[in-house]
Amino acid sequence: ELRELAHGIHPSLLSSGGLALAVPELAGRCPVPVELDVQAEGRLPEVIESTAYFVVAEALANVAKHSGATRAWVRAHVVLGELELLVRDNGVGGARSEGSGMVGISDRVDAVGGRMEVVSPPGAGTTITVRIPLDGQVDEAIDGSVDGPATGSVAR
């Protein structure tokens, strides 16, 4: 599984169940406890789900490797025609945007026309916010609304 992630191979759980199934499984592999709030219904275009998955994977890898955090949070919701991802931790902060992990996240987000913001004051944790436009591609399974239902869960 780690080899697949490292090489950017599309995980089968993401293909079969979308972000609602794949992100909790991903968070469950993180050594830092992760609280999730992931849109539960409907599917997004494959390229958007894949981008979001790998953004969360890299961000959680950074949390585990660099943050010294005792807790992390992941939120993924469709808001006003965009997928909004938020990955936050309570670690040491001071994340550098020129690090390979952050550059990788930024490159993925740029490739789909999205934008990324990193807030990481020293001593106050890191928050990565990513917004990816859906361009009207939201699956009908979301019942025509841009704010689908959400579920909350805690994973370890």
Image (cartoon, grey):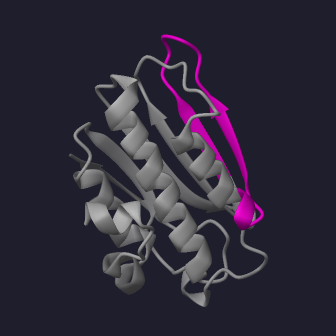
* Left or right: residue 15 compared with residue 81: left
Residue at 67% in and 55% down? 107
Does 92 lie within the magenta span? no
The segment highlighted magenta reads 110-130
> On screen, 14 above or below 115?
below
Residue 122 quadrant: top right
Return the x and y of residue 10 as percentages of the image width and height: 42, 77
Return the x and y of residue 18 as percentages of the image width and height: 43, 76
Does 117 lie within the magenta span? yes
> On screen, 11 above or below 99?
below
Residue 44 visible (yes or no): no
Return the x and y of residue 50 as percentages of the image width and height: 52, 71
Residue 103 quadrant: top right
Residue at 56% in and 66% down? 51
Residue at 61% in and 72% down? 48
Q: Quadrant of the N terminus?
A: bottom left
Residue at 58% in and 51% down? 104
> On screen, 134 above or below 83?
below
Return the x and y of residue 64 as percentages of the image width and height: 32, 36
Residue 89 visible (yes or no): yes
Check the image and name the residue furthest to the top.
Answer: 123
